[in-house]
Amino acid sequence: MGTPEHKLVQDVSTRWNSTYHMISRLLEQRWPVTATLSDPATQRGKQYLDLKSDQWTLLEELAQALQAFECATVYLSGESYVTVSALPPLVKGLLKSTHTSYETTPVQAFHGAASKETTARWSGEVTFTDDKQSKQIIAAALHPRFLKLKFLTPEERFSFQNKVHALALQHMDRNTGNQDATASAEKGSPNRRTVSVLDSLLGSDSTDSDNSEEDAHNQKIRNEVLMYFGEQPLSKTESPLSWWKSNEARFPALASLAKSFLCIPATSTSSERLFSAAGNIASKKRASLTPEHVYCVFLCTLIVGKDGLFFLVLDFEC
């Protein structure tokens, strides 16, 4: 039949995308499955498992509808590249994909429910408001590929540039304050010039000088933010971390801010792989184990009894 020789896949209740893999594999093996169930040698009690034409059509449309969610899930679960910055544009893209029209009523209902649930789950994280700081949008703004913030309206982009400017000022002031405090502790408190009451009322020269330095610092950060958002977006093949390393001298304030946000993982998938028992057994350092041995080792778990003793549970079938 020219079909790849693959086994069918079962879905797992704790991993939604396993349903997508199950449907995709079943569609791939449609004709071998149909031929097997139609074979006279197959028990009559099994022949009813063959799907009807409209059911196959439903699965085809459902697989197409789930593909966008599968792609987003896999991308956000990565650990070798920046992920959190991609969350806002991905959510906008998923919502756009739910507007695709389908023939079958169940898939249309699924798209409506998926759009509603996605909006309810992620609207707070990917929607900009003046009174809320969204780490996902900040990370997207500091990602050179998404710096144009196309998932926001023009008014929101302008307001968000002001938000980034304020954050960069706070971040630089915090770092400068820590450095000044350390330097003062090492050198001791400097002698302060006595300022008369009249000077304080009229405004001393030192106060004017401080204000002038603060205004110059503020304007420097403002120019840096405007210059950054005027840059050309990064291509898909280039790394944002390498870009920031090369342009740190041009954007020192934003580069320091980017280090604080681009390191955030979008999901907990990496942590689950690292700290789960099955993930530890099947990791690369134990890659020589066969699936059967992984199963056996995983069943050798320690269980704490009521009396505080440890019991080793073994599966003797291994």
Image: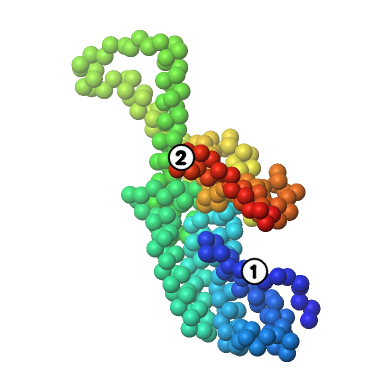
Residue 41 position in % (x across, y down): 74, 87
Residue 216 position in % (x across, y down): 42, 32
Tell me the residue at 45%/19% (across/down).
Answer: 182
- Cα–Cα span, label 1 and label 2: 42 Å
Residue 118 position in % (x across, y down): 44, 64
Question: On the rendered image, what quadrant is the C terminus found in?
Answer: bottom right
Closer to us: 242 or 73: 73
Answer whether labels 1 and 2 touch (C-beta < 8 Å): no
Closer to us: 267 or 43: 43
The residue that mark 1 highlights is: 9
User: Which mark sits nearer the N-terminus, 1 or 2?
Assistant: 1
47 horizontally vs 152: left or right: right
Closer to us: 312 or 273: 312
Q: How is the image coloured?
A: rainbow
Residue 185, compared with residue 315, is above or below; it is: above
* Residue type at numbered disc 2: Asp
Identify the element where label 2 is drawn.
loop
The residue that mark 2 highlights is: 307
179 horizontally vs 6: left or right: left
Residue 13 position in % (x across, y down): 52, 64
Tell me the residue at 42%/14% (across/down).
Answer: 185
Tell me the residue at 40%/41% (across/down).
Answer: 166
Asked if one can make out residue 296 in the rendered structure from this viewpoint, the answer is: yes
Residue 27, compared with residue 314, is above or below; it is: below
Mark 1 vs mark 2: in front? 2
Residue 15, compared with residue 183, is above or below; it is: below
